[in-house]
């Protein structure tokens, strides 16, 4: 339908490799087409109302990966596929993946800041895959050209994403990672929602430190009017003194217990219950029914100055170690509306204010952590947050895995955290293993009432965080390979030097490349006690296997067979050289 609905008879088409073509219309003109390594770079002069269209063979496609990918809609029709993007919403990148994990078509646009929308999907009529970028007025006002990157050869889809992500991040320096960014987190949100107090935090502090967490993320509920799950009281950002009579003292006590404090804030929300509303109401013209509060328009300098001041004050007054800055995407309610401030585009305004907040936080408390979460994951805001976290998915281990892996594929410099892990405390202990093993390729966040958690759950959490820490270097820093997107990434592996970690989230065949591997670690997040495998080079290896709770035993890995593993556990295999 995209090929029929947008005056494509006037589009001028140019052929690239492998049957991929791009077209420009509505006054847009191609300036140049150049090859840079694996990527064709197309520079297009743009005008308002113009368009850039891509068409590629559908081939044996099984999924179209993009930053908001979900396997429930793996391969949308072209009349359905839509994703908005801006500085605080997604990014204009996509990869068409086939049934064996190759990229049939992979592209990215470099317009990361201004708001826009990609239309995409399988064409019923042409039996091809099509993508369209309409040139909005704001985009054309901000820049005269757009660069389109298309991966020229067919490569693994993960590699295609990484190649494109490197281009999108080019010239964008990441924020230096805080020391605590690479350590497990205790989060208060799912554990207590807004019902947090000084006493609640202190009851959990020693247990959190004991299981391996080094920071506590104090979430929504610490602030004045922080009750009721809605945000009509947001805006003042001062502690609720009935919950926290001396909040700086609370932070100091947590520090004495070995925990750094990161504080949640939703600075762009301002409720009419707050004292701040009287001064800020004229800059908050849109009411969010979903959040039940007003949203500040960042295109006004008064808003940006206020927000920077709030964040700096919190860091200074309470000696915080970082901020979890939430609901940034709420400002997109102003996308496409006339601005009465000094900046026309919401994305431009957000890059300004987030840069200033990050600088102010660093100035007040050097080395502090700043966390963003999906969907505000654009490379253009990477310099302003060292941590990006998976979106909310309470108790959904599979979604947590998919979300963290989506972020891992896109991120270059940022540290990926899981959504806080929670589970039913009355469930079998295997539930703990499933939840945590599903987020092993990110930094785990835990959110349970630890002080009343069953002992076997607490012990298992500690065991798994200890195992995670021992594997952290390869899990987070190794070469990542993931299974097919449409299957929800059932197998994941990461290799660094001679260490290879392979995770099974469904009882699938492990395809092992053991050349140069001295230690093979299998994460078995299934109920199976044996997993099928093949060895790529067909050579036999011998060594010693050690599963959790078992004694070491000799093992021989031939060309194919089954590996005995513990259900919901970790097996380490040391291979003889």
Image (cartoon, rainbow, N blue to C red):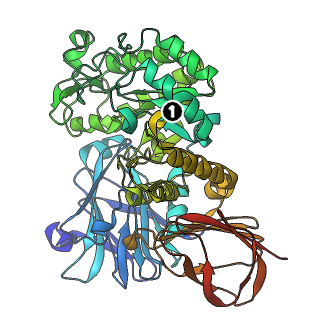
How far across and down, in percent of the image, does residue 284 sit? Answer: 21, 23
Picture residue at 28% right of the left edge, 34% below the top? 331
Q: Point out the image quarter for the N terminus.
A: bottom left
User: Which quadrant would residue 492 be assigned to in this image?
Assistant: bottom right
The front one of 83 and 35 is 83
- Left or right of residue 108: residue 566: right
- Left or right of residue 502: residue 269: left
Q: Report whether residue 177 is seen.
A: no
From the image, tell me which residue sits under label 1: 370
How far across and down, in percent of the image, does residue 437 sit? Answer: 52, 58
Q: Report whether residue 458 is seen.
A: yes
Picture residue at 25% right of the left edge, 70% below the top? 76
- Left or right of residue 188: residue 234: left
The front one of 296 and 199 is 199
Picture residue at 53% right of the left edge, 50% below the top? 169
Q: Look at the picture and state if 304 lies above or below 328.
A: above
How far across and down, in percent of the image, does residue 144 sit? Answer: 37, 48
User: Which quadrant would residue 44 be assigned to in this image?
Assistant: bottom left
Q: Residues within 10 Å of mark 1 (few under 14, many from 20)?
A: many
Q: How many marks?
A: 1
- Left or right of residue 499: residue 255: left
Q: Look at the picture and state if 359 lies above or below 147.
A: above
Q: Look at the picture and state if 114 lies above or below 73.
A: above
Q: Point out the image quarter for the C terminus.
A: bottom right
How far across and down, in percent of the image, does residue 481 sit? Answer: 56, 68
Secondary structure of the residue carrying tag 1 is strand
The front one of 265 and 31 is 265
User: Which quadrant would residue 79 be assigned to in this image?
Assistant: bottom left
Q: Look at the picture and state if 501 lies above or below 375.
A: below
């Amino acid at each position: 339908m995209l090929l029929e609905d947008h005056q494509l008879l006037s589009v001028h088409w140019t052929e690239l490799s492998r049957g991929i073509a791009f077209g420009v219309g509505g006054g847009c003109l191609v300036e140049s087409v150049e090859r840079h390594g694996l990527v064709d770079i197309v520079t297009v002069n743009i005008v308002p109302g113009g368009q850039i269209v891509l068409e590629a063979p559908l081939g044996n496609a099984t999924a179209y990966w993009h930053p908001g990918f979900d396997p429930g809609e793996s391969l949308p029709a072209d009349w359905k596929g839509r994703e908005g993007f801006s500085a605080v919403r997604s990014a204009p990148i996509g990869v068409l993946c086939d049934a064996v994990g190759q990229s049939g078509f992979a592209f990215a646009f470099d317009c990361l800041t201004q708001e826009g929308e990609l239309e995409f999907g399988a064409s019923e009529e042409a039996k091809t895959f099509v993508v369209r970028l309409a040139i909005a007025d704001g985009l054309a006002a901000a820049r005269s050209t757009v660069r389109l990157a298309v991966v020229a050869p067919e490569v693994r889809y993960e590699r295609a994403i990484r190649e494109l992500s490197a281009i999108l991040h080019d010239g964008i320096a990441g924020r230096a990672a805080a020391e605590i960014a690479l350590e497990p987190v205790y989060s208060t949100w799912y554990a207590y929602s807004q019902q947090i107090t000084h006493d609640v935090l202190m009851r959990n502090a020693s247990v959190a430190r004991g299981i391996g967490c080094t920071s506590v993320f104090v979430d929504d509920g610490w602030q004045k009017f922080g009750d009721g799950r809605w945000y009509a009281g947001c805006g003042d950002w001062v502690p609720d003194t009935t919950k926290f009579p001396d909040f700086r003292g609370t932070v100091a006590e947590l520090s004495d217990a070995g925990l750094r404090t990161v504080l949640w804030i939703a600075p762009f929300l301002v409720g009419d219950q707050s004292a701040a509303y009287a001064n800020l109401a004229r800059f908050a013209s849109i009411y969010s029914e979903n959040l039940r509060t007003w949203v500040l328009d960042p295109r006004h300098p008064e808003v940006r100055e206020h927000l920077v001041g709030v964040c700096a004050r919190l860091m200074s007054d309470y000696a915080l170690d970082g901020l979890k800055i939430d609901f940034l995407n709420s400002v997109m309610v102003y996308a496409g509306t006339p601005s009465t401030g000094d900046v026309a585009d919401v994305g431009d305004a957000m890059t300004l204010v987030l840069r200033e907040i990050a600088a102010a936080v660093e100035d007040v408390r050097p080395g502090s952590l700043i966390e963003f979460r999906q969907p505000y994951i654009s490379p253009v805001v990477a310099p302003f947050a060292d941590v990006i976290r998976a979106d909310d998915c309470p108790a959904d281990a599979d979604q947590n895995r998919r979300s963290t892996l989506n972020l891992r594929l896109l991120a270059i410099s940022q540290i990926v955290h899981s959504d806080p892990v929670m589970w039913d405390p009355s469930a079998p202990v295997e539930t703990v293993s499933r939840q945590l093993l599903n987020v092993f390729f990110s930094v785990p966040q835990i959110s349970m009432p630890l002080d009343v958690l069953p002992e076997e759950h607490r012990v298992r959490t500690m065991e798994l965080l200890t195992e995670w820490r021992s594997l952290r270097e390869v899990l987070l820093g190794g070469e990542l390979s993931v299974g097919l997107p449409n299957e929800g990434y059932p197998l994941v592996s990461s290799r660094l030097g001679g260490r290879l970690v392979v995770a099974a989230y469904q009882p699938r065949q492990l395809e092992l490349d053991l050349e140069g591997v001295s230690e093979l670690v299998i994460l078995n997040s299934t109920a199976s006690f044996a997993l099928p495998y093949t060895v790529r080079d067909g050579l036999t290896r011998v060594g010693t296997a050690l599963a959790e709770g078992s004694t070491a035993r000799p093992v021989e890995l031939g060309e194919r067979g089954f590996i005995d593993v513990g259900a919901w556990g970790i097996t380490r295999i040391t291979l003889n050289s």
